[in-house]
Image (tube, helix red, strand yellow):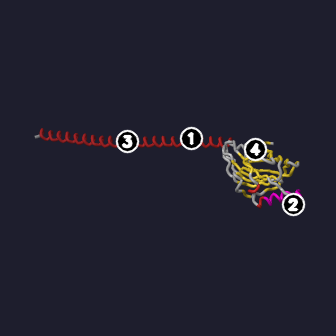
Amino acid sequence: MNVHIARDWVDYVEAAGVLVSLLLAGGALIYARKSSDAAAESAKAAATTAAAATQEAEQTRELLRLASDQHARLVREATRRPVLATPMLLFQASIDPGQLTMAQMMSMDALALSDPVGKEVLLWPVVARALFENIGDKPADQTLARFVVPVEVGLWRTSQDGERSQNVDLHDDDLTLSVPSGHSQAHAYSWRIQHLPPGQPEALHVLLVFREPGDYEVELQAQHEEAEPVGQRFVIGVPEAGPSEVEPA
């Protein structure tokens, strides 16, 4: 009888030990799983942090590149400037005086202050082309251009063939220019060249009307606030017959 009771206690103790072992094993399993999940979260967080750091580094490099490009552009812009070439004047054509309008002929009569009343006046109309060019590496927009002629010479803007002309405002100028009779005061036509990019010459066709044959000085000028002003004087030879000639003075 006593032996049977002891055996039951042994079984009870063994069962309790097994139960404790199972509980401990379960606890260890739960702990291991939590540790594994925590490790996975840590790894995920580390990967996210690494990706964010990589993205931030890329953004920093891009900002540095943009700043470097902007600095380079500013340096290039600071060294760029317009450069005005010496203006050119080319003979285009002589036209028949009969093509002049009545208003143009009356304008020429108003310039002939020294001619005797009733004297027959012959006119020599010539179409010329003035060229202005920017040979720099920066646009020279709003360049001020001037065409200066003796007061005895009429000037109109015109088409290439001289058939469509328009009046311009001529104002007194301080220059003195040579004319067949000696020297003369001058008047000038001034205008702005709206756009003058590098390498794209700007052409102006003018109708010049002379009262007598001979050699006349005219001058072309151009200036821009960022460029050195330029100018060139030309001699227009008006023969009694045949085409006129234009040469630098």
Q: Which residue is mark 4?
A: 228
Residue span colored magenta: 105-119
Q: Secondary structure at mark 2?
A: loop
Tags 1 and 4 touching, CB below 8 Å: no
Q: Which residue is mark 1?
A: 65
Q: Earlier in the sequence, mark 2 or mark 1?
A: 1
Q: CA distance from mark 3 to mark 4?
A: 73 Å
Depth-wise, is mark 1 or mark 3 nearer the camera?
A: 1
Residue, x 14% and y 39% (percent of image)? 7
Tags 4 and 2 touching, CB below 8 Å: no
Tags 1 and 3 touching, CB below 8 Å: no
**Amino acid type of the residue that numbered disc 2 sits on in the rendered structure:** Gly
Residue, x 18% and y 42% (percent of image)? 12
Residue 82 occupies which quadrant of the picture? top right
Image side of residue 182 versus residue 198, left or right: right
Q: Return the residue nearer the eye: 28 or 183.
A: 183
Q: Earlier in the sequence, mark 1 or mark 4?
A: 1
Toward the left, the furthest residue is: 1
Q: Which residue is mark 2?
A: 118
Any mark on residue 40, and which? 3
Which quadrant does the N terminus fall into?
A: top left
**Amino acid type of the residue that numbered disc 1 sits on in the rendered structure:** Arg
Which quadrant does the C terminus fall into?
A: top right
Q: Earlier in the sequence, mark 3 or mark 2?
A: 3
Number of marks in picture = 4
- Inspect the magenta stretch and tell me whether residue 112 lies in it: yes
Any mark on residue 25, and which? none
Depth-wise, is mark 1 or mark 4 nearer the camera?
A: 4
- Inspect the magenta stretch and tell me whether residue 211 lies in it: no
Q: Percent from the top left, x then y, of residue 228? A: 75, 44
Q: CA distance from mark 2 to mark 1?
A: 80 Å
- Relative to 6, say whether 103 is above or below: below
